[in-house]
Amino acid sequence: MSFLQTVIAFLVALAVLVVVHELGHYWVARWCGVKVLRFSVGMGKIVWSRRYGPDQTEWAISMLPFGGYVKMLDAREQDVTTLPPEELRREFTRQSVWKRIAIVAAGPLANFLLAIAVFAGLYCYGIPEPATRIRAMPEASVAYQAGLRGGDLITAVNGEPVRAWSDLRWKLTELAVDKAPARLDIQRPNPAVAGGTFVETVTVSLSGLVAEDLETDFLVKLGIDLARPKAVLGKIMPDGPAMKAGLREGDVIHSVGDKQVSDGLAFVELVRGSAGKPLQIRGVHADGKAFNIAVTPETYAKDNQSIGRIKAEVPLAPEMVTTSDAPLPAVGKAIVKTWDTSVLTLKMLGKMLIGEVSWKNITGPITIADYAGQTARIGIISYLTFIAFISISLGVMNLLPIPVLDGGLLLYYSLELLTGRALPERFGEIAQRAGVGILMTLMAVAVFNDIVRLMS
């Protein structure tokens, strides 16, 4: 069932992105007076089509679901010698270079506008997300050495406010790519005032991160992790080690053996790593009475590993915040988010070219499909966010100056503006072959990375 859901989620996302991209080309072509012969979702053999409108444009679905195209009246592809003058005026190559640039650029622009619309809608609706409160970290970590402590609430990064964990992670990712220091404004309890807080600023160095760190959760390497609630037991399963030992719902765990338990996740990790080993658990019952109980986690096999469990729920849900904005601020935030994402994507591509970031970061259809399925199972907000990010990536990739992509065509037309004449057809043919070779190489790398991720 999950496989079918993944396939459906991937195809729906792909269809939305392709249709929006090609509609950009279509509408601007119509606006510029160019005749559109066919609008196809998918590539290859046509499996369904209908003709609509005054130009009898063919609207088609093709066999291969990867991509789509808008076919215009074009002298390079059709014989136009027998067409009347009023039709020839609507042929693509007879348009001014500015109109051709507008038609080609409209596809990527439509992808950026889709991302802005999705982000703006989500910002207006309100997105429940984990707060920027951090859990206790090892004393040897970069975060601890910089002055961060468990329970700190990060409110700004380099002067820019952050309200949710995704905002914090995004800002730190941008800085990590540039190896720039992160100046964090933190809010922490004020011991001198009951219920009071004070704000302090600490600077975390990101220069120690290497390219491989950006492929994983680099925040954990720095010592920055999401705060979790205290270790309080929830429902106790019948006939499990916890019930047999005398643990109860509502028990607060303080320590396991000689190790203090900072939160629920720390307790879960200790239990999981102690399969078949007796643990001395100390804490306080819900009625306030202290306890010191020995519990031996039973062994449970998962993914070829033996993990321990005591059959007791431990709530791990972090502190949540819901961020929402009025329509105009939401649109402004969406534009900034789309711009920042586009710039970061280009920076990552540039660092791949010079070897500062691994080519393992290139993903292909298998990984994208997997993410589509995962986000769809989480919920509509995650799925829409995924579509917005992929739409930005599609827009950026199509603007790269690679022949056969929109960016390659824009490069041709820019050179035509500078020289005052169109590039020779022979040059275009050679460039097209080179562009196909580049794309095939990138696709091979992406699929290889996908397979490696799948196997590991």
Image (cartoon, rainbow, N blue to C red):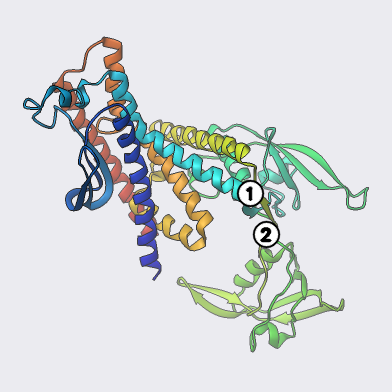
Q: Nearer the viewer, residue 288 or 425?
A: 425
Amino acid type shown at disc 1: Trp
Query: Residue drawn at (44%, 49%), measured in percent from left and top?
Result: 387
| Residue located beneath label 1 in the image | 165
Quadrant of the rendering where the C terminus is positioned:
bottom left
Give residue 29's quadrant in the image: top left
Q: Most extreme residue toward the left, as rendered?
A: 82
Quadrant of the rendering where the N terminus is positioned:
bottom left
Q: Percent from the top left, x then y, of residue 71?
A: 21, 37
Q: Secondary structure at mark 1?
A: helix
Q: Nearer the viewer, residue 87 or 416?
A: 87
| Label whose residue precedes the other's in the sequence (1 or 2) | 1
Amino acid type shown at disc 2: Pro
Q: Percent from the top left, x then y, of residue 35?
A: 22, 32
The answer to whether one can see residue 208 in this image is no
* Local crowd size for mark 1, using a 10 Å CA cut-off: few (<14), some (14–19), many (≥20): some
Side of 270 relative to 373 (left or right): right
| Residue located beneath label 2 in the image | 318
Q: Secondary structure at mark 2?
A: loop
* Local crowd size for mark 2, using a 10 Å CA cut-off: few (<14), some (14–19), many (≥20): some
Q: Percent from the top left, x then y, of residue 41?
A: 27, 48
Cα separation, mark 1 vs mark 2, equals 10 Å
Q: Nearer the viewer, residue 254 or 93?
A: 93
Give residue 418's quadrant in the image: top left
Q: Percent from the top left, x then y, of residue 446?
A: 33, 46
The answer to whether one can see residue 187 in this image is yes
Total numbered badges shown on the rendered structure: 2
Query: Residue drawn at (66%, 84%), measured in percent from left and top?
Result: 241
Asked if the residue at tag 2 contacts the one at tag 1, i.e. Cβ–Cβ closer than 8 Å, the answer is yes
Q: Nearer the viewer, residue 216 or 171?
A: 171
Side of 418 relative to 424 (left or right): right
Tell me the tag on residue 372.
none
